[in-house]
Amino acid sequence: MADHMVYRTIINAVENESLIEPFTRKDFQLACPGLGDGTYQAFLPKHRKGNPSRTSELFEMVGIGKYRLIRPFLYDL
């Protein structure tokens, strides 16, 4: 899988308005088809601000199961 491909896919979907913030896992799955089931289950919580594993913080959780991208975007995306 290319570096940051899932993150880039989410950014593109938000920018072209096929994914509206705040979004849920189901919204993510509908707007960004073709990823693995595990990606839809784990990517958002794994990369949320304050995640326990200290993985890169890409999203802010703004409600139960609802996420918003943290800006500015990382990795020059």
Image (tube, helix red, strand yellow):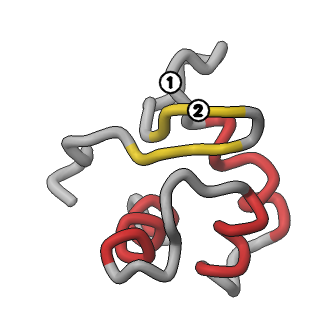
**Label placed on residue 61:** 2
Q: Residue at x 58, y 32 (%)?
A: 61
Q: Residue at x 31, y 73 (%)?
A: 15
Provide residue 73's location: percent of width, then percent of height: 25, 47
Say what amino acid the circle numbered 2 marks. Answer: Met
Mark-to-mark CA distance, 1 and 2? 7 Å
Mark 1 residue element = loop
Provide residue 36's location: percent of width, then percent of height: 77, 72
Q: Is residue 68 left or right of residue 62?
A: left
Mark 2: few, some, or many residues within 10 Å (few <14, many ≥20)? many
Q: Residue at x 44, y 31 (%)?
A: 56
| Closer-to-camera residue (11/76) | 11
Q: Which residue is mark 1?
A: 49
- Specify the quadrant of the image occupied by residue 16: bottom left
Q: Is residue 7 left or right of residue 38?
A: left
Quarter the C terminus occupies: bottom left
- Specify the quadrant of the image occupied by residue 4: bottom left
Provide residue 49's location: percent of width, then percent of height: 50, 24
Say what amino acid the circle numbered 1 marks. Answer: Lys
Q: Residue at x 49, y 33 (%)?
A: 60
